[in-house]
Image: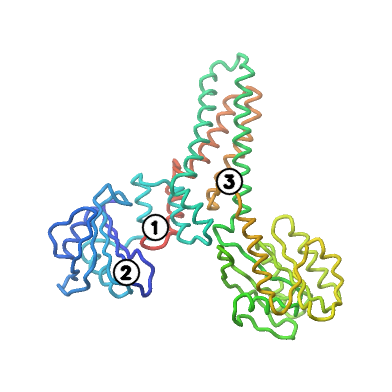
Amino acid sequence: MSDTIAAVATASGVGSVAIVRVSGDNALDIAKKVTKRETFSPRYAHLSSLYNQNDELIDEAIVIWFKAPHSFTTEDVVEFQCHGGSIVAEKILETVLFYGARLAEPGEFTRRAFLGGRIDLTEAEAIAKLIEAKSDETAKILARQMKGELREFVDDVREKLLRAVAFAEVTIDYAEEDLPDDIVNNILHQLEEIELKIGQIVSSSERRRGMIEGFKVSIVGKPNVGKSSLLNAMLGYKRAIVSDIAGTTRDTIEEQIRVGSHLIRIIDTAGIRDSSDTIEKIGIERSVEAIEQSDIVIAIFDVSRTWDEEDEQILSLLEKSGNNKEIIVALNKIDLPKKLDTKKLEQFNPLQLSQDNKAEQIFSELEKRLSKMAQGDELLLISARQIEAVKRARSAISQAKEPLLMGELEIFTFHLNDAISAISSISKPVDFNDIMDKMFGEFCLGK
């Protein structure tokens, strides 16, 4: 990490302020060349003129020097806080690179903070996810992780497992003797408690994954039941084509929309029916996939039409999905004469949608469901990497219990060491190069 890196740390586009960040051994020397100043006080905002390598004025900006190790990366860091817009920031970056810095890779500033011991992997991932937070609740959870909530849990589990391994290692030379039942039972009880706890965390994290990734909501139904008109009403403009011709929507349409404190992805799907049209069939297949991948499904039924095989097909899909996702059934066109037999839908407590307020009704129900899904004080694993690590730890703990009861301590410690390695990989893995390359590579540039 001896080289000095630089990047624009703010989002591209027009804004009042842009920040160019420089980190490394030569950060201060570069700042002196750009500003033509000889001295800087640490953590002091210096109003300075900035010049390029041809002594041409670029901007007048605030320059702050964070002296190592008292910076985010634990290295010397200089921030140029210039006027916003891409041109000024890019000119400063070009000059900094000319004086010896190199362009930072995505996530490299945070990677250096990790390598410098400022943060661990749980905090690094929380930083990355916080930038993309989709709700107030998510931001609060990620803020707790940045303060070390997940790290403390990992450390606690690892400490308990290490104590169990230490017991086994100490007594392994005396394996021929009978081990006290109370010690074995105490260890077994503790392992079962850990297994139960991490199982609950995995289950809760998978159930609430939409808090991190953004909840997905799909609108489904047979052709011409009002799916696209509902989407348009929710968006407040005509995003989807509305027509009396069956099969008008031939592909999924995705938009982001805010419901309460949540930013969700809402998907209008092609009408589900039997079709000989090749393009429409592809759209219908994507509709079925959208149901499987969604957290909430809004199923629309037209009360002005009689129940048919297409309605039966939609109902079958809902019943198959009902155990692992939220289902909202809405009866549309209730202003028209009723022809639909709705007895089969009563299990879903269907909403009655009128033309005047259907968007408001759906918004209200969605907010209730989203608040329900976001509830819970359990620790939340925020990435597939973390979930997979905890699953591996749980599996290894489960495999360790039988050898413990059989007095086979070598096998017992083998499995527990696997569990320790898995749980440790969440915060401070022993072999972390591959993990870091993948994880930090997903960060935005300048972070």
Residue type for callout 2: Val
Identified at 72% across, 62% down, the residue is: 327
Which residue is label 3 attached to?
378
What residue is disc 1 on?
107
Q: Residue at x 18, y 66 (%)?
A: 48
Q: Which mark is residue 17?
A: 2
122 or 17, which is in the foreground? 17
The label nearer to you, 1 versus 3, is 3
Badge number at residue 9? none
Quarter holding residue 277: bottom right
* Above or below for 60 versus 42: below
Tell whether 8 sits left or right of 345.
Answer: left
Q: Secondary structure at mark 2?
A: strand
Q: Residues within 10 Å of mark 1 (few under 14, many from 20)?
A: many
- At numbered mark 1, what does the secondary structure look like: helix, strand or loop? loop
Task: Decide if residue 441 is on the left or right side of residue 228.
Answer: left
The residue depicted at 56 percent of the width and 48 percent of the height is 387
Of the residues tagged 1 and 2, which is closer to the observer? Answer: 2
Considering only vertical position in the picture, is 183 above or below 216? above
Callout 2 crowding tier (Cα within 10 Å): few <14, some 14–19, many ≥20: some
Question: Picture coordinates of residue 175 (x, y %)?
Answer: 58, 17
Three-letter amino acid code at the position of disc 1: Gly
Q: Residue at x 64, y 18 (%)?
A: 181
Circle nearer the N terminus (2, 3): 2
- Residue 12 at x, y = what percent? 38, 71
